[in-house]
Amino acid sequence: MLMSWLSKLRGLQWLTLALVFLLFSWVFSGEINTGGDVSGKTSQIVNKSVTPENMKQDDLLRVRVLRSVAKKYVSSLTINGYTEAKTRLVVKAETSGRILSLQKEKGAFVKPGDTLCQLDIGSRKSRLLKVESRFEQAKLDFDAANKLKIKGFTADTRVRLLEAQLNAAAASIAEVKLDIDRTKIKAPFRGIIIKQNSEIGEVLNIGSPCVTLMSYDPMLIVGNISERNILSLKPGMKAWGEIVTGEKISGKIRFVSRSAQRETRTFRVELEVPNSDNILRDGLTAKFFIPLPSVRAHKLDHSILVLNEAGIVGVHMVDRQNKVHFSKITIIGDTPNEIWV
């Protein structure tokens, strides 16, 4: 048995030696050669361009294509913004005087002509009596001179002088009455008092603030739009929106700025909405949607989008010669599952 086992072992050694010999022969035969052959001569590597013309049909890259047909698409432009009062005004005194009373408290609703602050009339009534007496005297003198002129007993220049004095007295009456009327600081428009700028007993001069008044109907929704979309908007376009508190709104674009903000390169847009019930408040977060004209567009899956070497978004398209090429696209709408281009 020992002799038989040794005989088998010698057979395995010869088999191993034969396999090693064949392996070395194959390696040094030059069948695998990346830098040069065993003789030391440099090998030449020939690069041949592969084109659809010199490729066999089986060698061409096969791609799967999707035939897309453009459909009517109505998009809307979404603008994030906030509510803003159409008018905010600090109502100021047009004459001087001490405040006798504040007719309306902060938060009160007012209409045009309502008194906001009542100033002391002071000596204005006595001034009015004086100019009224002067007017009566000037009127008597003018009437008497006019009668004498008709009879030819007075000169025409004297009549004209007395007429001028009469007109001056009438102007003085109007001036004093206007000054008295200005002691009542009145609301110039319908709104709500948001700040009391003065107190009872305070002396106001011309230009001193009385109250701050804010209009509430209509209300504005203000936002900013990028320069890329500015040509899509114009005043008068209808829009709808939603306030952060849940209220739905609708109105029309009243203003599109023609000057961009230098810091953001965006343009101010104002949507005017009715607010007769005073639900909307100033400064609430809001967004509004502006429907744009319908266009023909393709609906695609997000996974189809690719970037070219310049980082431009596009898709690969197959032309009539079955060649694939890159095409730039413009995205006009998107959802979590699809895009419109």
Image (spheres, rainbow, N blue to C red):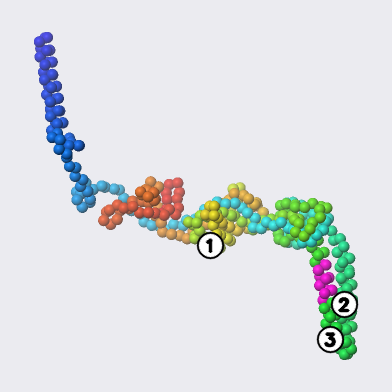
Which label lies toward us, 3 or 2?
A: 3
The amino acid beneath tag 2 is: Ala
Q: Secondary structure at mark 2?
A: helix
- What is the quadrant of residue 150 in the picture? bottom right
Q: Main secondary structure of the magenta part?
A: helix
Distance of label 3 from label 2 (alpha carbons): 16 Å
What are the residue bounds of the magenta stretch?
Answer: 166-177
Of residues 325 and 162, the one drawn nearer to the viewer in this rendering = 162
Q: Position of residue 238 (x, y in %)?
A: 55, 60
Specify whether residue 299 is painted magenta. no
Which label lies toward us, 1 or 2? 2
Q: Residues within 10 Å of mark 2 (few under 14, many from 20)?
A: many
Name the residue tied to disc 3.
156
Residue at mark 1 to residue at mark 2: CA–CA distance: 61 Å
Q: Amino acid at mark 1?
A: Lys
Residue 136 to residue 207: above or below: below
Residue identifier under label 2:
138
Q: Could you say which disc has been placed on residue 234 in the image?
A: 1
Residue under the point 83% across and 82% down:
160
Q: Residue at x 52, y 60 (%)?
A: 233
**Badge 1: few (under 14), some or many (20 or more) residues near its Cα, within 10 Å?**
some
- Residue sticking out furthest to the bottom: 152
Q: In this rendering, does residue 180 appear at all?
A: yes
